[in-house]
Image (spheres, coloured by chain):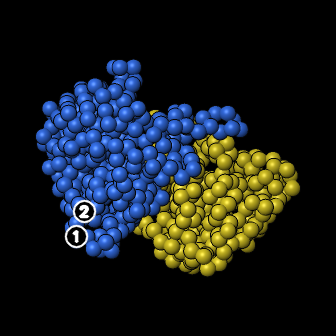
C-alpha cells in the first residue's frame, strides 16, 4: 500500500455549521491511492502544542482534490480552521483498511455525525460499480444545521437519503438506527460510521437480521502507522485490534462491543 | 565528514537511532523513512511470551507531549524472530533488540534466546518494568535489582549490552554506576517519566491504567539534565533519549555527553524525523567547520 508524507495546498475551507468545517486539499498522490474508509494523519501546524497529528477519514476524492470533514472538538481542530486557500498542510496517508468494495449488494450506508464523512467517498464509489438501484442512505446528526448540507450532497449523487435528528429539526425525530430495521431485509451488507453507541446498535440489528456489517472506528491515535499501539479496540476473539492497521474499518463481529 | 560513532563494540554510521516502542519493527515506517540511513533501528520491546497490553484508552496527548500506557504489548520473541526480524535483513542498518521481563530469569532467558540469532547487533535492556517477585517495584528504580538484571543478561549473551535507565529515581548517577558495574557496555536514558491526566468532566483518569509514561518535547530538559549527570558519572558510552525532535535537540544531547541519540515520540508525528536529524547533523558539522561528530560529543562549555 502506498503511503505518502507531503505538504498539500489548501484549496478551500468551508464552514458548514457552527463547528463543522470542510477542508479541501490539492493532494494528487493521496487522491490516486485512497480507498473509501481510509484515513490521513494531519499535522495541524508547526507548533509542538498540539503535538500529534490528527486522524481524519477521507471525505471526498474528486479528481486530485481530497476533502476532509471535521468538527472543532479541541485545540488541533481549532488550529485547522485557521487555514485558508494557498496555505499548506502536512499530511500522511492514505492509511488503514477501508470499506469492502466488492462485498455483496445491495448495501445500506449508515452515518452519524462526523461519521458521515467517509460515506460520501464510499457512496461515489458505489455509483461507479453500477450495482442497480441502491437502498436509502441513512444519515443522523444532532440538528438540521449539522445535517442538511451533507444530506443534500448525497441526494445530488442520486441516492435516496433518510435523515434523523436528535431535535427533530430534520427528518425522523430520534436515532438514525431506528430507520434501519425497515430496510435491513432488503440489503446484504451494512456499512456504518458514527459514534460508538450508534455503531453498537447497528451491529446488533445486523446480527439479529444476519446481515454482514462493517464499522469504521475512531480512537485516539498517535502515529496512524501501527507503531504506537495506542489505538486499541477490544476484539471479540480476545486481545485487541489496532484501529490504524486492522481498521479503521472492521467487520462488526470482530469487535467486542462493550 | 564523519558522522560515525562507536557504542562500545558497536560501530554506527551515524548517531541517530529510533527509540524502542516508537518505530514498531521498522517496517511500519518503510514507506515514509529511508531505513538504510539510520544509525540503528531499535525495535519494539520484546518479551518471552506475547503480551496483549493494556485496555484502552492507552494514550493521551498533553502539552507538548503524550502519556502512554501501552502495557508492553508485543508479539513475543518467537514471532518476532520468524515474522519481524527477517524483513530487516535487507538493510545494513544494525538492529538492536529491546528486551523486557517480569523476572531476572525472563531477561536472562530472552538474552540467551537472542544470542546466536543472525542480524541482531546488540540488546537494549528495558529495566523500567515492574519486578513481579518484588511487589511490582520497577527493576530500574533500585540499584541492586538493576545490577542484578544487567549481570544476568551479561552472563547470557555475548552481544553488546545497552541498559535503558528509568528517570523515575532520586539519583540517576547511582543507577548509571550500578549497571556499568554489572557489565553494561553502554547506557541509554531516559525512558518515560511517570505521569497522569484526569478528565475533569467525568473525574476519571484519562488512561485506563490511571498512570502512564510521559514522552515528547515536554520531557527534553529533564532528559538532558539526566544525560549530562549520567555521562559525567560513568565511563561507558551514554545514549541520549527524551523528547528529541530536531537537529538542535540532538546536538544538545551530544554536547551534554551523549555519544548517540534516540528519536522517540517525534517518529509519531514526523515519520522522517530521524533522517532529517542525520542531514541536520551533517549540515551542522559543515557550518562549524568540523570533521567529525565526535568533536561535538561532550563539548559543553561551562564557565567556571
- Image colour for chain B is blue
Q: Which image quadrant is residue A107 in?
A: bottom right
Could you tell me which secondary element the residue under label 1 belongs to? Answer: loop
Which residue corresponds to mark 2? B295
- x then y, percent, for residue B298: 28, 54
In terms of depth relative to the viewer, which is nearer, B124 or A202? Answer: B124
Residue A145: give its label.
Answer: none
Tell me the yellow chain. Answer: A
Residues tagged 2 and 1 counted as in contact (Cβ below 8 A): yes
Question: Are discs 2 and 1 located on one and the same chain?
Answer: yes
- In-image side of B301 versus B150 (left or right): right
- x then y, percent, for residue B271: 42, 61
Q: Is residue A164 above or below residue B180?
A: below
Instruction: Say few, some or many: other residues with alpha carbon within 10 Å of mark 1 (under 14 / 14 to 19 / 20 or more).
Output: some
Which residue corresponds to the image point at 35% horizontal and 51% vertical from the top-left?
A: B304
Question: Subunit of mark 1?
Answer: B
In terms of depth relative to the viewer, which is nearer, B160 or A93? Answer: B160
Q: Is residue B262 above or below residue A256?
A: below
Which residue corresponds to mark 1? B291
Quadrant where the image shows the C terminus of chain A: top right
Which residue corresponds to the image point at 28% horizontal and 65% vertical from the top-left?
A: B37
- In-image side of B107 versus A144 (left or right): left
- Measured in 3D between alpha carbons, the distance from the residue under mark 2 to the one under mark 1, in whole angstroms, is 8 Å
- x then y, percent, for residue B159: 16, 43
Which residue corresponds to the image point at 51% horizontal and 43% vertical from the top-left?
A: B67
Which residue corresponds to the image point at 58% horizontal and 63% vertical from the top-left?
A: A44
Amino acid at each position: 500500500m502506498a503511503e505518502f508524507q507531503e505538504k498539500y495546498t489548501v484549496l478551500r475551507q468551508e464552514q458548514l455549521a457552527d463547528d463543522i468545517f470542510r477542508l479541501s486539499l490539492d493532494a494528487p498522490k493521496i487522491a490516486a491511492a485512497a480507498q473509501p474508509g481510509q484515513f490521513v494523519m494531519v499535522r495541524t501546524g508547526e507548533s509542538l502544542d498540539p503535538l500529534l497529528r490528527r486522524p481524519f477519514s477521507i471525505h471526498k476524492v474528486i479528481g486530485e482534490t481530497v476533502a476532509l470533514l471535521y468538527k472543532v472538538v479541541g485545540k488541533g481542530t481549532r488550529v485547522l480552521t485557521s487555514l485558508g486557500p494557498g496555505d499548506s498542510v502536512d499530511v500522511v496517508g492514505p492509511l488503514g483498511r477501508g470499506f469492502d468494495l466488492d462485498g455483496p449488494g445491495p448495501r445500506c450506508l449508515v452515518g452519524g455525525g462526523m461519521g458521515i464523512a467517509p460515506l460520501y467517498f464510499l457512496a461515489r464509489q458505489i455509483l461507479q460499480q453500477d450495482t442497480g438501484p441502491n437502498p436509502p442512505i441513512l444519515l443522523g446528526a444532532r440538528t438540521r444545521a449539522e445535517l442538511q448540507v451533507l444530506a443534500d450532497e448525497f441526494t445530488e449523487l442520486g441516492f435516496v437519503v433518510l435523515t434523523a435528528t436528535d431535535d427533530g429539526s430534520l427528518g425522523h425525530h430520534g436515532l438514525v438506527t431506528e430507520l434501519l430495521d425497515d430496510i435491513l431485509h432488503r440489503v446484504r451488507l451494512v456499512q456504518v460510521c458514527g459514534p460508538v453507541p450508534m455503531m453498537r446498535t447497528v451491529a446488533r440489528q445486523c446480527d439479529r437480521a444476519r446481515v454482514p456489517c462493517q464499522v469504521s472506528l475512531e480512537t485516539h491515535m498517535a502515529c496512524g502507522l501501527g507503531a504506537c499501539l495506542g489505538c486499541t479496540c477490544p476484539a471479540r476473539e480476545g486481545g485487541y485490534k489496532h484501529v490504524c492497521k486492522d481498521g479503521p474499518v472492521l467487520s462488526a463481529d470482530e469487535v467486542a462491543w462493550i | 565528514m564523519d558522522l560515525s560513532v562507536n557504542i562500545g563494540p558497536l560501530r554506527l554510521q551515524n548517531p541517530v537511532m529510533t527509540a524502542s516502542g516508537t518505530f514498531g519493527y521498522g517496517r511500519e515506517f518503510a514507506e515514509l523513512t529511508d531505513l538504510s540511513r539510520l544509525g540503528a533501528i531499535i525495535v519494539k520491546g520484546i518479551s518471552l511470551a506475547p503480551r496483549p497490553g493494556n485496555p484502552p484508552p492507552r494514550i493521551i496527548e498533553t502539552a507538548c507531549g503524550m502519556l502512554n500506557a501501552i502495557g508492553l504489548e508485543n508479539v513475543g520473541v518467537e514471532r518476532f524472530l520468524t515474522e519481524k526480524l527477517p524483513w530487516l535483513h535487507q538493510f545494513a542498518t544494525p538492529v538492536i533488540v529491546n528486551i523486557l521481563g517480569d523476572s531476572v530469569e525472563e531477561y536472562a532467558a530472552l538474552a540467551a534466546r537472542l544470542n546466536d540469532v543472525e542480524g541482531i547487533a546488540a540488546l537494549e535492556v528495558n529495566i523500567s518494568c515492574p519486578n513481579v517477585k518484588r511487589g511490582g517495584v520497577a527493576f530500574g528504580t533500585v540499584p541492586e535489582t538493576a545490577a542484578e538484571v544487567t549481570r544476568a543478561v551479561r552472563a547470557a549473551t555475548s552481544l553488546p549490552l545497552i541498559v535503558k535507565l528509568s528517570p523515575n529515581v532520586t539519583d540517576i548517577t547511582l543507577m548509571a554506576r550500578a549497571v556499568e558495574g554489572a557489565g553494561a557496555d553502554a547506557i541509554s536514558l531516559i525512558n518515560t517519566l511517570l505521569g497522569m491526566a484526569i478528565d475533569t468532566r467525568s473525574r476519571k483518569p484519562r488512561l485506563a491504567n490511571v498512570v502512564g509514561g510521559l514522552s515528547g518535547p515536554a520531557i527534553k530538559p529533564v532528559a538532558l539534565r539526566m544525560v549530562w549527570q549520567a555521562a559525567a558519572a560513568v565511563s561507558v558510552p551514554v545514549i541520549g533519549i527524551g523528547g528529541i525532535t530536531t537537529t538542535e535537540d540532538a546536538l544538545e544531547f551530544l554536547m551534554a555527553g551523549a555519544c548517540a541519540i534516540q528519536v522517540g515520540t517525534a517518529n509519531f508525528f514526523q515519520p522522517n524525523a530521524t533522517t532529517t536529524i542525520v542531514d541536520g547533523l551533517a549540515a551542522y558539522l559543515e557550518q562549524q567547520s568540523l570533521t567529525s561528530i565526535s568533536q561535538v560529543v561532550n563539548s559543553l562549555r561551562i564557565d567556571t
